[in-house]
Image: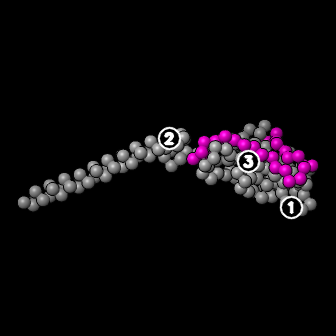
Amino acid sequence: MDGGATPDIAPPTVYGTATIMNSSARDVNVTWEFSIDPGFQYLLRFHFCDIMSNEISQLYCNVYVDSWLLVKDLNPNYFSYTLLANAIYMDFVSALNVSNKLRVNIGPSSIPNVLPNAILNGLDIMKMNNSLGSLSGSATLLSDSTSYKTNEGMLVGFITGAVIAVLFAAIICML
């Protein structure tokens, strides 16, 4: 859990609206599918604020990304202890994506005697650069890695040549 949200994290209007699961349906998730570039990781920032409950312990939900359970039995009010409608955010980094789709789901908790429900106020998806510092697709990655290897080969050649020249100069000085 990253903490209480401030206006620097997201504007208050983010926490005043929400997508809420239909609580009369059982075993139903709310799902979003986003187009992404494969070969990258993504920073996902989830924004939660329970604007629908009358008590702190009424809303529990599960959060998934690409069928992976990220948070089980999340109660957005838990972190504020006594306040309802306290805005929080949580950051996660996705696995390296091989697909061009990213799916985010919220669904009901399996805690007994809790109404099935789920809420999400906002979601930020930010592409993370790769190990070369690039945000481009895989074609650029191949050319970048090729030029890196070429530069590395040139550096090894230069160092080897310099060592040979120093050794040669040392041998001549000794004669």
- Chief SS of the magenta region: loop
Residue at 72 percent across and 54 percent down: it is 67
Residue at 60 percent across and 51 percent down: it is 96
Within the image, what quadrant is residue 112 found in?
Answer: bottom right
- Amino acid type at circle 1 is Ile
Up the image or down, 62 lies above or below 22; here it is: below
- Amino acid type at circle 2 is Ala
Name the residue beneath numbered marker 3: 104
Q: Is residue 66 left or right of residue 23?
A: left
Residue at 15 percent across and 56 percent down: it is 168
Q: Is residue 56 left or right of residue 67?
A: right
Up the image or down, 146 lies above or below 168; here it is: above
| Closer to the eye: label 2 or 1 | 2
The earlier-in-sequence mark between 2 and 1 is 1
In the image, which residues are magenta? 15-42
Asked which secondary structure carries label 2, the reply is helix
Q: In x, y percent, where is residue 91?
A: 68, 50
Is 122 included in the stretch rendered in magenta?
no
Asked which secondary structure carries label 1, the reply is loop
Q: State the separation of the CA atoms marked 3 and 2.
A: 27 Å
| Closer to the eye: label 3 or 2 | 2
Q: State the separation of the CA atoms marked 1 and 3.
A: 21 Å
Name the residue beneath numbered marker 1: 111
Q: Residues within 10 Å of mark 1 (few under 14, many from 20)?
A: few
Name the residue beneath numbered marker 2: 139
Q: In x, y percent, where is residue 174?
A: 9, 61
Asked which secondary structure carries label 3, the reply is strand
Is 19 included in the stretch rendered in magenta?
yes
Within the image, what quadrant is residue 6 found in?
Answer: top right
